[in-house]
Image (spheres, rainbow, N blue to C red):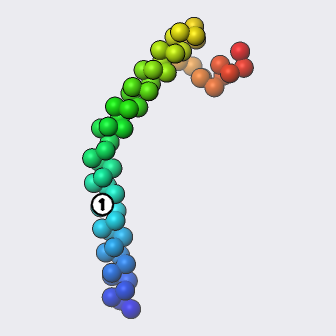
Amino acid sequence: MITVILVGFTTLVAIAATVGVVDAASAPKRRLTATERRHEWERRQHLHGRPRGGNSWADEDD
């Protein structure tokens, strides 16, 4: 019984470590994508004449 618990715990630790490594490796690409999307969103907001900052959800009711 203890062997099953240890194998299960070891498996969970291995999965967590794998997910952590993969996440850390892909983080810079996700940050770059997020930055590009934000710049594009800001450009669209500027083209529509909406002010920067504030609550973006409040603009829907204008």
- Where is residue 19? Give x, y as percent: 34, 57
Left or right of 43 in this view: 35: left
**Residue at which label 1 appears:** 18
Residue 15 in which image quadrant: bottom left
Question: Left or right of 61: which side holds 1?
Answer: left
The amino acid type of the residue labelled 1 equals Thr
Residue 52 visible to an observer of this rendering: no
Image height check: is 61 above or below 34? above
x and y percentages locating residue 48 in the rendered image: 58, 10
- Depicted 46 relative to depicted 16: above or below: above
Secondary structure, mark 1, is helix
From the viewer's perspective, is residue 16 above or below residue 25? below
In percent of the image, x 44 and y 25: which residue is there?
38
Q: Position of residue 51 (x, y in %)?
A: 56, 11
Q: Residue at x 71, y 15 (%)?
A: 62
Q: Is residue 58 visible?
A: yes
- State the residue at coordinates (35%, 34%): 31
